Image (cartoon, helix red, strand yellow):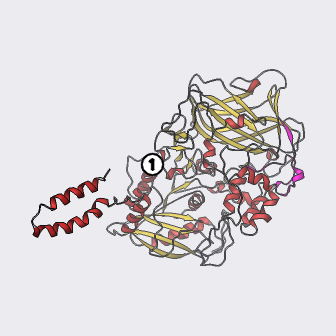
Amino acid sequence: MPSHGAVKQTRCIVSLMRCPLSKRWIAISLLLALPALFSQEPVPKKSPEAERAEYFRANYTKYEYLIPMRDGVRLFTSIYAPKDTSQKYPVLLMRTPYTVSPYGDDNYRGLPANTEKFAKEGFIFVYQDVRGTAKSEGEYVNMRPYLPVKHGPKDVDEASDAYDTIDWLVKNVPDNNGNVGIWGISYPGFYAAMAAIDAHPALKAASPQAPISDWFLGDDWRHNGALYLAHAFGFFSGFGRPWVEPGDIRPHPTTTFERGTPDGYDFFLRLGPLRNIDPALFGTQAAFWKELLEHRRYDDYWQARNIRPHLKNVHPAMLPVGGWFDAEDLAGPLAVYRALEAQSPETTRTLVMGPWSHGGWMGDGEQLGNVRFASKTAEFFRDKIMLPFFVHYLKTPTDDFKLPKAYVFETGRNQWRKHDEWPPAEAAARMLYFSEGGKLSWTPPEGGQAFDEYVSDPAKPVPFTEETSAGMTYNYMTSDQRFAARRTDVLAYESEPLDRDVTVAGPIECDLRVSTTGTDADWVVKLVDGYPGTYPDPDPNPSGVRMGGYRQLVRGEPFRARFRNSFEKPEASEPGRVTKVAFSMPDVYHTFRRGHRIVVHVQSSWFPLVDRNPQKFVDIDRATEADFQEATQRVYRSGDNRSAIRVRILQ
């Protein structure tokens, strides 16, 4: 069948033969162009990234400076200023260890995804390489400790570097209005929180988003002392190459080895004990990996890097932001908010928690893995919370702008909620007890000493996900747990199907009574939402997921038993002795819908998310293959030794 263009061309030829000779040559010239006209492809639509870059370049001018700090070290800073100089603009600063590249006045960094409205609103955007990274001078220190007392200009920290940077900006950047805001996600979130300590008077608003707050007790690398192996390994194999010399661009190298498999479970298991990793793979390119392993208890090294005690008398308005399903820094924003509540009660502050993975609030926030949230939650946050926050405190204060103490997303029912405090004061504490036959009950069990037991084998640890992945996946935080409940080394306790919605708001407190035949053990507790078998599949459903009977992870956390009495002074377990292990899991705000079940899992490995515990009281980073041993783990559930979790129920 001839094409539509060919049919049109044939009709034109017939018409041409009927034309006078003088007009025929003009028509022939036009006819020769017809094939190109009819076959021309439509102009491709520009990508959102290209449109952002084009707008940014058309409306902003880039400048680069080396800004001097009080000790003479200069920090490389890129400034993007509006070309419209008819008004003055506030400064919106981000400090980062991940480079502010590309470098050069004509090479634009561009806007972060989905921040077009910020550019159109009008700010002076500033990005800075922190001390010792990329083109900044000085020595880089991971999570550089804060110095409460500074004896002279040589005593510097991230708070003083932020202060000196802001002081230079307001004095030297044309057309600024004297107001500065700072924000950042993850490591830049840590720098945003540090800037609020001893803050420069011009710093009016700060939004530490997924900030690191404590690297031993809950953020990134260690949770309650247990090493998050897959995450730490993946990060430090590409971050931390030693500084070469000031002025050089420090590259972020990729790993210098091939894993040989996309299966992280297989890779780490074959790799063996932690002692095999540094000499075999990292060499000297990731010095912090060695520090991470050697500081195996909560010593002065980690305590100095805890920012929470220093969040006192904070003056800027604070907007800590986090994700309920952040695999990296879920604990950080909650810890920062609680520190402000306790130590800076006069500070204007709002906690924002949404249904997001790490930094997911810069996407659309409609779903994570197989779980959907019914709306573009991230777009709502940016348009209704983050942008108005910075506009109000840096540009135009308005009487109708008011944020609650907590602006949080309730998963399960999938709705934004406002509260005057977090956790909500009206949330009542309830105990959920482990009972006979894998039951989970609001009523404490009676009778003598009863227990459930399983054999934990470090040679066959429980996977943290069914998904084949080389490292830690963001989606594991909402992943299906049916595979885990089918293992003999996982205990699963389930409620009856609920006859009404049950909303859990706040931290989950675990109170376990356990014993082990080893001298150390990990205790992993998971809170799971058990969907009914009739739950509908998504529509459309390109991945073919079946949601009937889905067991959604709501929260999970490990605890290394050697720290049950003190994180500073680990101690062995006495084999066979019933021991109390109590700890808190990070907050949730989740509604278990009517017809669903509340489910709790208990297990002793979660691999390779968490490194394997030899189940022998040894320094795990020095353990040999011979130190890893099977152990029989018991969870007690009656009499004086009742195991339970404590939740806060919001009516």
Magenta run includes residue 546: no
Residue 50 image offset from top left, x and y in percent: 42, 62
Above or below, 640 against 622 in this view is: above
Decide if residue 308 is on the left or right side of residue 40: right
- Asked whether 574 or 524 is in front, the reply is 524
Give the amino acid type for the residue marked by disc 1 in the picture: Glu
- At horizontal 58% and vertical 22% (from top left) the residue drawn is 499
Whether residue 557 is visible, yes or no, is yes
Asked where in the image residue 463 lies, by quadrant, the reply is top right
Against 367, residue 278 (above or below) is: below
Name the residue located 66 percent from the left edge and 51 percent from the top edge: 469
Q: Which secondary structure lies at badge 1? A: helix
Q: Which quadrant holds the C terminus?
A: top right
Q: Which residue is mark 1?
A: 379
Magenta stretch: dominant secondary structure: loop
Judging depth in this view, the residue of 551 and 174 nearest the camera is 551
Residues drawn in magenta? 610-634
In the rendered image of this protein, does residue 129 appear above or below residue 112? below
- Nearer-the-camera pick, 189 or 440: 440
Q: Residues within 10 Å of mark 1 (few under 14, many from 20)?
A: some
Q: Does the magenta-highlighted stretch encompass residue 621? A: yes
Q: Position of residue 366 (x, y in %)?
A: 49, 44
Position in image of residue 61 (x %, y %): 40, 71
